[in-house]
Image (tube, rainbow, N blue to C red):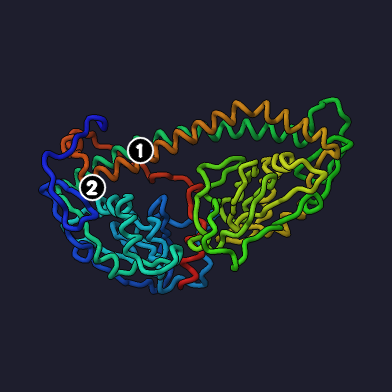
Amino acid sequence: MIADLKPYPTYRPAEGKWLGEIPSHWTVRRMKYVVRETDSRSSSGKEQLLRISQYTGVTQRSRADGLDEPDTRADSLVGYKRVEPNDLVINIMLAWNGSMGVSRYSGIASPAYCVYRFGCDVHPWYCHNLLRSPAYKARIKASSTGVVESRLRLYSDDLGRIEAILPSPDEQAAIVRFLDWANGRLERAIRAKRKVIALLGEQKQAIIHRAVTRGLDPSVPLKPSGIPWLGDIPQHWETRPIKHWTKVNVRTLGQSTNHEFEFRYIDISTVRTGYLVRAPELMPFAKAPSRARRVLVAGDTIVSTVRTYLKAVWFVGQEAENLIASTGFAVFSPNPELEPEYLHHVLQDASFVDQVTANSIGVAYPGIAETVLARFRVAIPPSRNEQRDVIAAIKKQTQPLTVAISRLEREIELLREYRTRLVADVVTGKLDVREAAAGLPDEAPLDSIEDDAELGDETETADEEAAV
């Protein structure tokens, strides 16, 4: 069905050159005539707390420990902004990266957000897809106020001047119906691949755990490790705190760094256990977030210390030139007695990661200090030759799993790119979906798109609450 979509019969130049051509019967209206800002405040602070993400739109904020209290550092939520279903919510500090969306929920949002309500002839979810499309994200970025990218703000007057392209209300509804159906199909495919990745990851972790806790020789005598979560280890292995095997956070960018210096940036959402889900983002220091400070070199292992990303662990291979990580990572640089890649396997072992998670503190935002992490004891074979043998065995046994995971991650990336392009082409009138939408079956929409905690934004909560 998607492959059969065609352009509209006729087009015309849109008012506003940046929009190009639009279907001849569509209209253009400035956003100030499409939405109106609302500013109703909570008197109790007891409503459902909401957040906004460039990946997932408006979602309910739930605590990592499963309790019912609000997921926030704020002492009180009195005065937070009320949000109703179908309201547009925008994080004005991160609108430039797409942190906006229409809410499915009643609740309250940070005072750092702006909340808008649509007119009666505008379908909220059509505008949700329109404003989050690449062309509109670029326009929003260009319309925002500020000098440095990470400090751009989209105020209501800025939003109001942006042109919105609008088909009739019936056609908006048809577009939303079609995109809900297409997104559902694509999301189910992504989730199926994610499940396979999880199973492959479990197999890989089992191989690593066996190798870094018992070694390769099943006949070697064992001894108690003295580490409750580790159990017995080969008799000749040594147990020491990580800080005795490594140096922690030894290289950092300073404020005096040349603003033209370009580097490849790794944030928390980029990393999984043992691999990256996307390439590091190239950016100049002048436009980098303030947390882009950890300088990486080949042989380092980075471990997340923050929030829901405590299972993000990655080894820095040879491609380390101009590579910078977020301060949300602890960076471990191994001493000469330790093979760098062996350290990586120890730190990504599921038992070790579970201990990191269990010893993290904080209610709304659990985390662990680098100094605490560095005191954790680990078991290491004293011979570098034995370390190399373990590395080689792990690599040989996990290589097919690593290749399969990489292939699936690439397939997911392609599906996301295809979805972005499809949505953009439909909401900007490049493809006519009216006939296709009319023939679709009635289906319940998925509970969310990209229902994936891995895709959160590490900066949003800190930014929004700092502005309160």
**At 59% across and 51% down in the image, what residue appears?**
322
Q: Which residue is mark 2?
A: 428
Q: Nearer the viewer, residue 285 or 355?
A: 285
The answer to whether residue 166 is visible is yes
**427 left or right of 112 in image:** left
The reply to whether dot 2 and dot 1 touch (C-beta < 8 Å) is no
Between 9 and 41, the residue placed more toward the observer is 9
Q: Position of residue 324 (x, y in %)?
A: 59, 54
- The N terminus - image quarter: top left
From the top left corner, tell me how far across and down residue 210 is, in percent.
Answer: 73, 32
Look at the numbered disc 1 and give the secondary structure of its residue: helix
Query: Hey, what amino acid is under mark 1?
Result: Tyr
- Residue 227 x/y as whole percent: 80, 46
Residue at coordinates 42% horizontally, 50% vertically from top-left? Answer: 55
* Residue type at numbered disc 2: Thr
**Residue occupying image coordinates x 58% and y 61%:** 363
Q: Position of residue 294 (x, y in %)?
A: 63, 57
**Distance between mark 2 and mark 1 Cα atoms:** 15 Å
Kind of element beneath mark 2: loop
Regarding residue 70, the answer to whether it shows in the image is no
Q: What is the crowding at mark 2: few (fewer than 14 residues within 10 Å), some, or many (at least 20)? A: many
Q: Residues within 10 Å of mark 1 (few under 14, many from 20)?
A: few
Number of numbered discs: 2
- Of the numbered discs in the image, which one, if any, rests on residue 418? 1
Which image quadrant is residue 340 in? top right
| Nearest to N terminus: mark 2 or mark 1 | 1
**Image quadrant of residue 37?**
bottom left
